[in-house]
Image (spheres, rainbow, N blue to C red):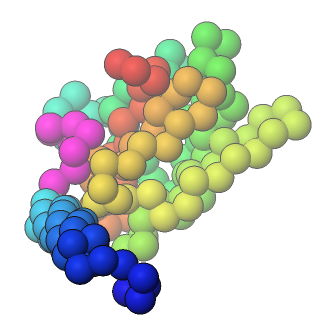
Amino acid sequence: MPPNLTPERRRRLTCLVAACLTTLLTTACEDAQDSKPRWSSTPTSGTTKDLRTCEDGDCTVEVREGDVIPFGESVRAPDLTIDAIGPAGVDLRLSGEGTTSTFSGQSPYQGGGVSTYNGTDFRVLEIKGDTAVLRIKPNGL
């Protein structure tokens, strides 16, 4: 602590630091205990293996490594390629004319994280061996 603090300010600063640490640790522990995805309640409900259902950018689909999901003109995203599926997560690549974006290590347990590209959200709901379930939807829905 800085030596020029009055005893009252030192006490207040100590209490503030303790409160911040308590909040940080409590939140981190709650997140670690919550092993369910926060983005969708039932990952397999309405899931399809037909990649064409994603043409409109709103689907829940089971994918394998090497699958390519083509989007229609209404979706402002290039085709989505599944580059890898494994214990570390799913690697997604959006590539089209003059653009490539990658989302590496996407997993159901990344704390509710959603990857977004030009108004389309991508979320890995479940990893089952060599397959994964993705939820693709317009941002904000």
Residue pictured at 28% horizontal, 71% vertical: 9
- 17 to 60, vertically: above or below: below
121 over 19 or under it: above or below: above
Who is closer to the viewer here, 36 or 10?
Answer: 10
> With 41 as the anchor, is 66 left or right in this view?
right
- Identified at 67% across, 13% down, the residue is 73
* Residue 113 inside the magenta-drawn segment: no
Q: In which quarter of the image is residue 111?
A: bottom left
**Residue 38 on the magenta span:** yes
On the question of residue 41 being in view, the answer is yes
Write down the region rendered in magenta: 36-43
**Residue, x 60% and y 18% (percent of image)?**
75
Question: What percent of the width, then of the height, locates residue 8?
Answer: 21, 72
Residue 77 at x, y percent in the picture = 65, 28
Identify the image quadrant of residue 31.
bottom left
Prevalent SS, magenta region: loop
Q: In this view, does 15 lie above or below 69?
A: below
Along the line of sight, which residue is nearer the eye, 87 or 3? 3
Q: In this view, does 75 lie to the left or right of 62?
A: right
**Percent coordinates x, y for residue 64 in the rendering:** 45, 54
Q: Is residue 47 left or right of residue 123?
A: left
Q: Nearer the viewer, residue 18 or 108?
A: 18
